[in-house]
């Protein structure tokens, strides 16, 4: 039986790995029940690195290239085994291949709104999402802290850890920076660059390098967004007196085309002026401006009605009426 086992034993003389599927970070070459032949060839392709482990101890790291596994290329392993200079026997070790390609289009986002203290809005909840990319740079560190002796380790298994770490760092970043949500949302590129710098040491602790981090969106929940929209609208309106006069002036040409002519427009304008006056009463600093707007509007209304009557009687032509109407409307804006 021992003889049969010996005859069945296979000696590996070529070791290599071709990545047959995306997302594999670590692949252990199948050396179980096999022995690596002294002088075996190890091929490490571009975008790969290899790690030799002997009896649980890290021996050597190989960058891209073709290697002959003997005493010249394995000085550390030779020292661990305390073999003589001939190093003639086959040896049993494990070879792990690591993909160093960039892992692209990895998505991150806040599964639920996160609560922060904003210097303009107080306590708010916000959402954010984007993409990031990284690559494996330190096989020893990744082997010791993450993958261990697994046959295979994928980036999908790393996804949750990296994504949650990123979201947690983003929350801390908001708190530490003191930058308002408005400024953060308006400068997403700078936000992403600053957040990347904060995360570089975290990725490095796993033997990874964070290559890029993109913030695609920073937003508030729907109910808070409505409040923000209302605030923005008030800021856009600015001077309520000018806004009221503009609305009134814009309604006159449309009303003149409807049934009832300017008489109907007068009723509509009365409502508009009343609304403008109500706003002015609630904003004392604008009362004087709104009152002036009311007087000017009534004067223009009276003049327009008289001119319209003259045009109806044929005293003024339609072109003359339109020209004078345009001049009068300019006084309202």
Image (spheres, helix red, strand yellow):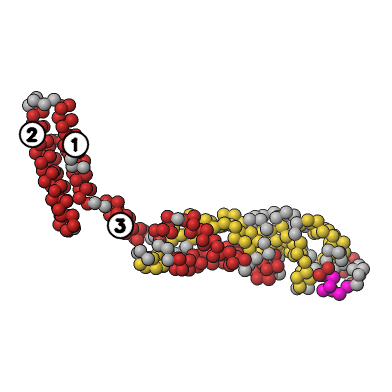
- Whether residue 10 is visible here, answered yes or no, is no
Crowding at mark 2 (Cα within 10 Å: few <14, some 14-19, many 20+) = few
Q: CA distance from mark 1 to mark 3?
A: 31 Å
Nearest to the observer: residue 271 or residue 328? 328
- Whether residue 281 is visible here, answered yes or no, is yes
Q: Name the residue at 42% across, 57% down.
A: 185
Which part of the image, by quadrant, shows the C terminus?
Answer: top left
Do callouts 1 and 3 mark residues in contact (Cβ within 8 Å)? no
Range shown magenta: 77-83
As helix, strand or loop, the secondary structure at mark 3 comes to helix
Nearest to the observer: residue 267 or residue 183? 183
Residue at the disc numbered 3: 231
Residue at the disc numbered 2: 306
Residue at the disc numbered 1: 253
As helix, strand or loop, the secondary structure at mark 2 comes to helix
Q: CA distance from mark 1 to mark 2?
A: 16 Å
Crowding at mark 3 (Cα within 10 Å: few <14, some 14-19, many 20+) = few
Q: Name the residue at 65% across, 71% down.
A: 145
Mark number, residue 83 = none
């Amino acid at each position: 039986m021992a003889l049969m086992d010996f005859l069945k034993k296979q000696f590996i003389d070529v070791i290599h790995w071709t990545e047959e599927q995306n997302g594999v970070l670590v692949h252990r070459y199948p050396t179980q029940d096999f022995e690596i032949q002294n002088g075996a060839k190890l091929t490490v392709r571009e975008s790969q690195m290899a790690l030799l482990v002997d009896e649980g101890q890290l021996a050597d790291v190989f960058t891209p290239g073709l290697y002959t596994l003997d005493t010249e290329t394995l000085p550390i392993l030779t020292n661990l085994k305390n073999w003589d200079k001939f190093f003639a026997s086959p040896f049993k070790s494990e070879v792990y291949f690591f993909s160093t390609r960039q892992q692209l289009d990895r998505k991150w986002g806040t599964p639920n709104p996160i609560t922060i203290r904003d210097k303009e809005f107080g306590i708010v909840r916000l959402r954010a999402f984007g993409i990031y990319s990284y690559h494996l740079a330190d096989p020893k560190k990744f082997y010791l802290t993450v993958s261990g002796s697994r046959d295979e380790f994928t980036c999908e298994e790393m996804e949750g850890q990296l994504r949650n770490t990123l979201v947690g760092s983003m929350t801390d970043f908001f708190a530490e920076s003191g930058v308002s949500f408005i400024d953060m949302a308006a400068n997403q590129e700078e936000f992403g660059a600053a957040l990347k710098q904060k995360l570089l040491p975290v990725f490095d602790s796993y033997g990874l390098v964070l290559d890029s981090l993109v913030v695609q969106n920073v937003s508030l929940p729907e109910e808070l967004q409505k409040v923000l929209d209302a605030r923005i609208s008030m800021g856009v309106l600015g001077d309520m007196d000018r806004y009221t006069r503009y609305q009134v002036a814009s309604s006159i040409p449309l009303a003149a085309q409807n049934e009832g002519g300017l008489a109907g427009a007068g009723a509509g304008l009365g409502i508009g002026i009343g609304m403008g006056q109500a706003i002015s009463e609630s904003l004392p600093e604008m009362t004087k401006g709104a009152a002036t707007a009311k007087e000017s509007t009534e004067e223009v209304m009276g003049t327009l009605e008289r001119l319209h009557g003259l045009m109806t009687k044929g005293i003024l032509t339609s072109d003359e009426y339109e020209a004078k109407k345009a001049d009068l409307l300019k006084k309202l804006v």
